Image: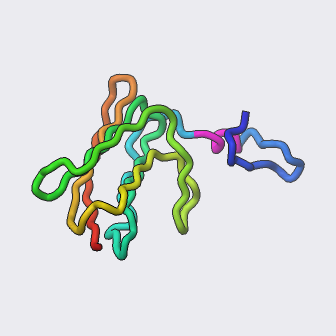
Amino acid sequence: DIPPGNSQASAKGKIKPAELADLGPDPSFALREVFAFPNPARNGANPAIHVEVGVAEQVDLKIYDMAGDLVKEASFNGSPGVHGHAGSEPQYAYEYSLESSIPTGVYLYVINARNNGVSLKKVGRFAVVR
């Protein structure tokens, strides 16, 4: 079965075997791209955290202000979604968008992804300018 939204096909309308690998998330579990965007988030833009780790059992996200206080947290289970950003090809990733109520400041995000007893961790920062 072809996941919805994937339309890779040859000129005859059939999927080529080499293209099958591109139709789903990478089943390997490894830390890839993890970033906040836009960074800085300005003029009312809501920042989002993008996490590429392949398929994980669970991805936990915690966002802290610079005083060390927990501001937001989220957890993801299951397969990642397809996300595209300006200037890049769509990627399978977990993403979390923050609402506009987050005030001006610098924030830390902590990602903890788990799969089959293996844990991957990434820490980064982003800024919000309202």
Residue 33 in the image: above or below residue 56: below
Q: Which residues are magenta?
A: 19-24
- Residue at 43% across, 49% down: 95
**65 relative to 100 in the view: left or right:** left
Residue 121 in the image: above or below residue 126: above
- Residue 111 in percent (x, y) is at 30, 44
Which is nearer the eye, 25 or 108? 108
Q: Is residue 33 visible?
A: no
Q: Is residue 98 visible?
A: yes
Q: Quadrant of residue 62?
A: top left
- Residue at 57% across, 55% down: 90
The residue at the far front in this view is 101
The residue at the far bottom in this view is 43
Residue 41 in the image: above or below residue 56: below
In the rendered structure, does residue 122 fall within the stretch colored magenta? no
**115 relative to 3 in the view: left or right:** left
Residue 109 in the image: above or below residue 37: above
- Residue 9 in percent (x, y) is at 79, 48
- Residue 2 in percent (x, y) is at 72, 38
**26 relative to 15 in the view: left or right:** left
